[in-house]
Amino acid sequence: MTPELRQLRYFVAVAEESSFTQAATRLMITQQSLSQQINALERILGAKLFDRDSRGTKLTDTGALFLPEARAVLNRADEAVAVVRRAVRGETGQLRLAFLASTANHLLPPVVRAARERLPHLQLTTEETTIGPLVDGLFDGRYDLAFTRPPQVPGLAARTVTTEQVCVVLPQGHPLADRTELTLSELANERWVMTPRSSWEPWHQTFDENFRAAGFTPDVVARDASVQGLLGLVAAGVGITRLGWSAHNLRRTGVVFIPLAGEVMATEMVWQPHNTSPALRRILNMVTDLAATTDLTTTG
């Protein structure tokens, strides 16, 4: 027969108080109930734990040996309860985060930094990827949460983290580089560099609609799958491109960012709606609070 945790707590209280009366007061039970439980514990162990006489209550030699063991069991039980409570509150466990390559530079550092400070028991793994693998990873469970431009696919839950100005990126020295704002229609005669259509067709369909609304089809002279590659092509004078303002952190020389009138771009947290992980909910709320107090388009 194994002692109950309650009996171990009662034993430790009596040992620490050296008094059944004081231990009963501390435990908020009657002295009679306490004595009964200690007697039951001694029967289970087959050993006398306390000597009581006119001078008070003291541990027997066996009781003194048992005291650190009882404390260790109680401490371990308390730790186990704390682990479960942290898990229920979403403060522990593991989350796999994906960052779209164009958002990782400015979003990954503040998100991970805040998680380490506020949720030190939560283990995060991070991965920078492109939109296709990112969406696939959400659907097949490889990622719990992704930070991305709106993927424009059904079946995923989303919450906006930031919105930012969309800019046209021009090479330094371009005739329009001194403008404070441009419209897309003013760029009809420019050569463009863009990502491959195969990178994510829903985005390119939206781009097509934007250009049609501006009255032209862009002359795309080169393509590159990465934001850094597009910026390099612009700096080399190959063509111009269109990116969110946050991309200016990736290249400080050779290019100029000019806001496009009336155009904004969102970054979202995206996840599977059936993912009920408390840790996921905790991170979602943490990032939402962070975004409300920090300009996440300029951090990094």
Image (cartoon, rainbow, N blue to C red):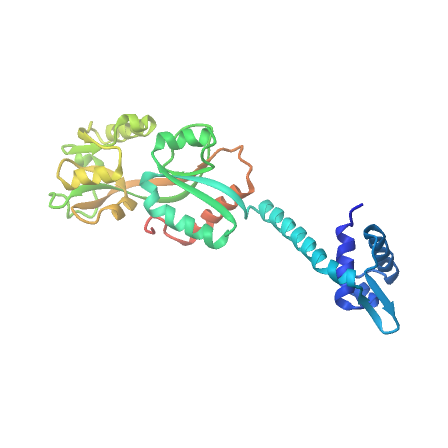
Q: Is residue 139 visible from the viewing direction of this image?
A: yes
Please state which of residues 195 and 52 is positioned toward the viewer in this rendering. 52
* Residue 86 % position (x, y): 59, 49
**Image side of residue 287 versus residue 264, left or right:** right
User: How many numbered discs?
Assistant: 0
**Image side of residue 17 versus residue 141, left or right:** right
* Residue 204 % position (x, y): 29, 28
* Residue 180 % position (x, y): 20, 48
Q: Is residue 183 visible from the viewing direction of this image?
A: no
Quadrant for residue 150, please give it. Answer: top left
**Image side of residue 64 versus residue 53, left or right:** left
Please state which of residues 84 and 266 is positioned toward the viewer in this rendering. 84
Above or below 228: residue 11: below
Please state which of residues 300 and 62 is positioned toward the viewer in this rendering. 62
Q: Residue at x 39, y 53 (%)?
A: 294
Q: Residue furthest bottom?
A: 55
Quadrant for residue 35, please give it. Answer: bottom right
Q: Residue at x 56, y 37 (%)?
A: 276
Q: Residue at x 36, y 29 (%)?
A: 132
**Image side of residue 65 versus residue 102, left or right:** right
* Residue 175 % position (x, y): 11, 43
Q: Residue at x 75, y 61 (%)?
A: 12
